[in-house]
């Protein structure tokens, strides 16, 4: 194992002792949750885009204004649910990692972005503040760093597989063909 992966691990679950917190931490930092977060982020970006098109442009035919308003409301509700799910994910991280969560710069950044987005979304609902909703949309774009973190996870996995192969003398090339079977004696063919 290289010096960097041994001492510079950015995953907090690597530093936990075995138990339910380690299991929870590994799940929160795992590939499935990262993929789910990326999918939810993508859904939220689409909903925000649709809502902006309907609310702030004249692209929608006035004949369909009522349907457009309904779609815009659904998009706003979906965005709020996505933010709540992001906050749930981060809360599980706090439970798993305890105080360590707040010493990790990426988790702090993520927590701040999601919390501010949630506050802006709620303020824009109750006070009809377009500025707060715009700020929430911008903050959600900041959360797009998750796509890069997921890509980093893939690269790190490839690196660990390569190190494992080197450590165990696995060449990773074509499998060695089995030796050819010897031809039976001509005398035994009767």
Image (tube, rainbow, N blue to C red):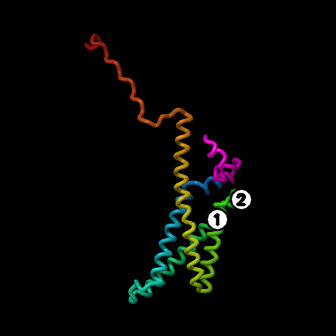
- Residue 73's x, y, as percent? 51, 81
SS label for mark 1: helix
- Establish if 156 lies above or below 105: above
SS label for mark 2: helix
- Residue 38's x, y, as percent? 52, 62
Q: Residues within 10 Å of mark 2 (few under 14, many from 20)?
A: few
Tell whether position 7 is magenta: yes
Q: Residues within 10 Å of mark 1 (few under 14, many from 20)?
A: some
Residue under numbered circle 1: 109
Q: Identify the magenta region.
A: 1-23
- Establish if 15 lies above or below 137: above
Q: Residue at point 56% right, 35% down?
A: 167
Residue under numbered circle 2: 103
136 or 25: which is nearer to us? 136
Seen as rendered, the residue at the extreme bottom is: 62
For residue 136, which quarter of the picture?
bottom right
């Amino acid at each position: 194992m290289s010096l960097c992966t041994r001492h510079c691990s950015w995953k907090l679950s690597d530093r936990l002792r075995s138990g339910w917190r380690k299991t929870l931490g590994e799940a929160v930092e795992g590939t499935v949750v990262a993929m789910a977060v990326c999918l939810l982020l993508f859904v939220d970006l689409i909903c925000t885009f649709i809502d902006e098109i309907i609310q702030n442009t004249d692209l929608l035919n006035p004949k369909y204004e009522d349907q457009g308003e309904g779609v815009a409301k659904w998009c706003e509700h979906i965005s709020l649910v996505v933010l709540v799910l992001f906050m749930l994910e981060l809360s599980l991280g706090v439970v798993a990692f305890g105080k360590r969560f707040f010493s990790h710069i990426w988790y702090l950044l993520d927590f701040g972005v999601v919390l501010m987005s949630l506050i802006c979304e709620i303020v824009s609902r109750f006070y009809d503040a377009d500025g707060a909703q715009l700020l929430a949309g911008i903050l959600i774009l900041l959360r797009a760093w998750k796509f890069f973190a997921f890509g980093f996870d893939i690269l790190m996995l490839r690196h660990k597989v390569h190190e494992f192969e080197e450590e165990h003398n696995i060449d990773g090339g074509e499998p060695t063909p089995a030796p050819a079977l010897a031809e039976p004696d001509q005398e035994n063919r009767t």
